[in-house]
Image (spheres, rainbow, N blue to C red):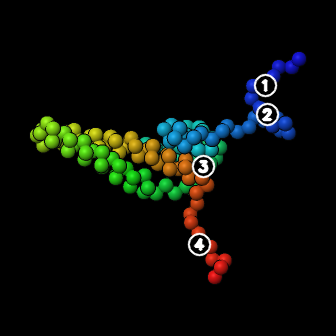
C-alpha cells in the first residue's frame, strides 16, 4: 500500500498548491506578503519592498498613501494627550518630566504602529482587490 501524502497535489501537474494567503492582521504584524505569506513585505523599517521575491507580487501597484499616518495622528494623538492630561491632573509633575516621558513614548508609538498600519492597509487592498475609483459614464 503506497504512503499517503499529507499535502494535496495538483493531479495534472503534480505540484503542491500555493500557500494560502495570510489573514490581514497576521500579515500586518509579521510584515508578510499578502499573497504568499513570506516575510518579504518591507525593505526597511517602514518602506515597502519593490516586489515579493517569492511570488513576484508587485507591491508598487498598491497605493497606501497617507492613510496610515492620518489615522495614527488622530488615534495616537488622542491617547497620548489623554495620558499626559491624566498625569498632569493627578501628579502635577514638572514640565521636564512631560518632555522626557512623552516625546520618546510618542516617537516609539508612531514608529512601531506606522509599520503595522501600512502593512495592514496594503494587505487589505490586496485581499479586497481595491483599485482606484472610476466613474461609470455609460448612461450619459
Q: Tell me the CA gap for discs 3 and 1.
A: 30 Å
Count of numbered circles in the view:
4
x and y, in percent, of residue 76 in the image: 33, 47
Q: Tell me the CA gap for discs 4 and 1.
A: 50 Å
Examine the rendering and report whether any part of residue 90 can be seen: yes
Q: Are marks 2 and 4 in contact (CB under 8 Å)?
A: no
Which numbered marker is on residue 127?
3
The residue that label 1 is drawn on is 5
The residue under the point 70% across, 39% down is 18
Please report whichever mark, 3 or 1, sits nearer to the chain's N-terminal start: 1
Q: Quadrant of the C terminus?
A: bottom right
Badge 1, how many Cα within 10 Å: few under 14, some, many 20+? few
Q: Is residue 42 left or right of residue 74?
A: right
Judging from the image, what secondary structure is the residue with disc 1 in? loop
Q: Tell me the CA gap for discs 3 and 2.
A: 24 Å
Please report whichever mark, 3 or 2, sits nearer to the chain's N-terminal start: 2
Q: Do the residues labelled 4 and 3 touch (CB within 8 Å)?
A: no
Please report whichever mark, 2 or 4, sits nearer to the chain's N-terminal start: 2
Q: In this view, does 20 lie to the left or right of 42?
A: right
Q: Quadrant of the N terminus?
A: top right
Judging from the image, what secondary structure is the residue with disc 3 in? helix
Q: Do the residues labelled 1 and 2 touch (CB within 8 Å)?
A: yes
Q: Tell me the CA gap for discs 4 and 3.
A: 22 Å
Q: In which quarter of the image is residue 136?
A: bottom right
Q: Nearer the viewer, residue 124 or 52?
A: 124
The residue under the point 65% across, 79% down is 139
The residue that label 4 is drawn on is 135
Please report whichever mark, 4 or 3, sits nearer to the chain's N-terminal start: 3
The residue that label 2 is drawn on is 9
Judging from the image, what secondary structure is the residue with disc 2 in? loop
The mark closer to the camera, 3 or 2, is 3
x and y, in percent, of residue 121 in the image: 50, 50
Amino acid at each position: 500500500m503506497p504512503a499517503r501524502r499529507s499535502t494535496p497535489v495538483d493531479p495534472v501537474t503534480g505540484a503542491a498548491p500555493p500557500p494560502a494567503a495570510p489573514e490581514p492582521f497576521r500579515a500586518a504584524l509579521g510584515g508578510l506578503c499578502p499573497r504568499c505569506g513570506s516575510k518579504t513585505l518591507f525593505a526597511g523599517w517602514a518602506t515597502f519592498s519593490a516586489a515579493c521575491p517569492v511570488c513576484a507580487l508587485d507591491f508598487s501597484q498598491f497605493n497606501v498613501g497617507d492613510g496610515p499616518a492620518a489615522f495614527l495622528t488622530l488615534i495616537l494623538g488622542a491617547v497620548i494627550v489623554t495620558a499626559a492630561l491624566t498625569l498632569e491632573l493627578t501628579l502635577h509633575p514638572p514640565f521636564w518630566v512631560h518632555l522626557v516621558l512623552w516625546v520618546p513614548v510618542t516617537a516609539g508609538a508612531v514608529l512601531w504602529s506606522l509599520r503595522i498600519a501600512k502593512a495592514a492597509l496594503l494587505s487589505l487592498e490586496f485581499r479586497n482587490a481595491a483599485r482606484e475609483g472610476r466613474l461609470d459614464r455609460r448612461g450619459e
